[in-house]
Image (cartoon, rainbow, N blue to C red):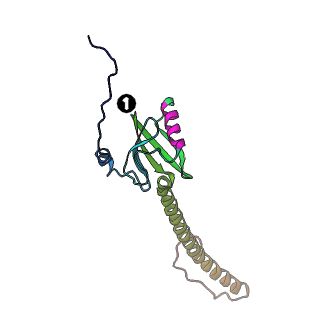
């Protein structure tokens, strides 16, 4: 008869590099990290030497947030790590009770927005300059023609009926 009585434990040692080599070359952005932690918050595998495997993750609150978000069904949340805001995404690996965790700093996520904002501002300033230049040139051409017309009218008012103005322009002023 087969029973489910515990008779011992099997200990299997696997080099951590077997895991980290799988995701070592994944690029998710500057300052971002990917690592695996177990159900108690201990880092099982990490590609970043600062995040030491075999030890608890430096921020206790991260694992608590992962656990809370897993209960609510959300796999992405925002967390403070080392005083900086990070977007954290995780995936639960069922049969191992492990979590694959990715942390991406908001400074990286927002860097493209800052670049776009600067480019829009630069294009706006250049456009404003050209609009002002064209407005000045159009205004100047109209005012020069009107001033010439006023001078001729003043001469005519003074009795000089021979004064004339040749205008090659074919518009209202011409």
**Residue 112: x %, y % from top left:** 46, 56
Image check: 54 left or right of 78?
A: left
**Residue 134: x %, y % from top left:** 54, 72
Q: Where 68 falls versus 124 (above or below)?
A: above
Where is residue 143, by image quadrant?
bottom right
Give the camera-side residue of 99 and 18.
18
Give the camera-side residue of 49 and 32.
49
User: Pointer 1: what residue?
Assistant: 94
- Residue 66 included in the magenta stretch of the image: yes
Q: Quadrant of the N terminus?
A: top left
Q: Quadrant of the C terminus?
A: bottom right
- Residue at x-position 29% and y-position 40%: 13
- Residue 136 included in the magenta stretch of the image: no
Judging from the image, what secondary structure is the residue with disc 1 in? helix
Q: Where 174 falls versus 93 (above or below)?
A: below
Q: Which residues are magenta?
A: 60-70
- Residue at x-position 34% and y-position 50%: 26
Mark 1: give few (<14), some (14-19) or many (20+) Cα within 10 Å. few
Instruction: Give the residue at the far right of this rendering.
Output: 158
Image check: 24 left or right of 129?
A: left
Where is residue 8, by image quadrant?
top left
**Residue 166: x %, y % from top left:** 55, 83
Instruction: Give the residue at the far top of this rendering.
Output: 1
Image check: 69 left or right of 21?
A: right
- Residue at x-position 72% and y-position 88%: 159
Task: Count the labels in the image.
Answer: 1
Secondary structure predominantly adopted by residues drawn in magenta: helix
Instruction: Give the residue at the far left of this rendering.
Output: 1
Give the camera-side residue of 53 and 83.
53
Give the camera-side residue of 22 and 14.
14
**Residue 141: x %, y % from top left:** 57, 77
């Amino acid at each position: 008869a087969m029973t489910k009585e515990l008779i011992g434990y099997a200990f299997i040692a696997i080099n951590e590099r077997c895991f980290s080599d799988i995701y070592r070359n994944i690029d998710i952005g500057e300052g971002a990290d990917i690592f695996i932690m177990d159900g108690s918050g201990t880092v099982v595998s990490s590609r970043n030497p600062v995040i030491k495997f075999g030890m608890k993750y430096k921020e206790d609150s991260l694992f608590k947030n992962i656990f809370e978000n897993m209960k609510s069904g959300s796999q992405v949340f925002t967390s403070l790590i080392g005083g900086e805001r990070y977007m954290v995404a995780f995936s639960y690996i069922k049969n191992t009770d492990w979590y694959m965790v990715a942390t991406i700093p908001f400074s990286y996520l927002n860097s493209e927005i800052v670049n776009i904002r600067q480019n829009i501002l630069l294009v706006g300033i250049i456009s404003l300059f050209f609009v002002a230049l064209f407005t000045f040139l159009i205004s100047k051409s109209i005012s020069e023609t009107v001033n010439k017309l006023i001078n001729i009218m003043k001469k005519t008012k003074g009795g000089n009926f021979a004064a004339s103005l040749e205008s090659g322009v074919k518009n209202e002023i011409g």
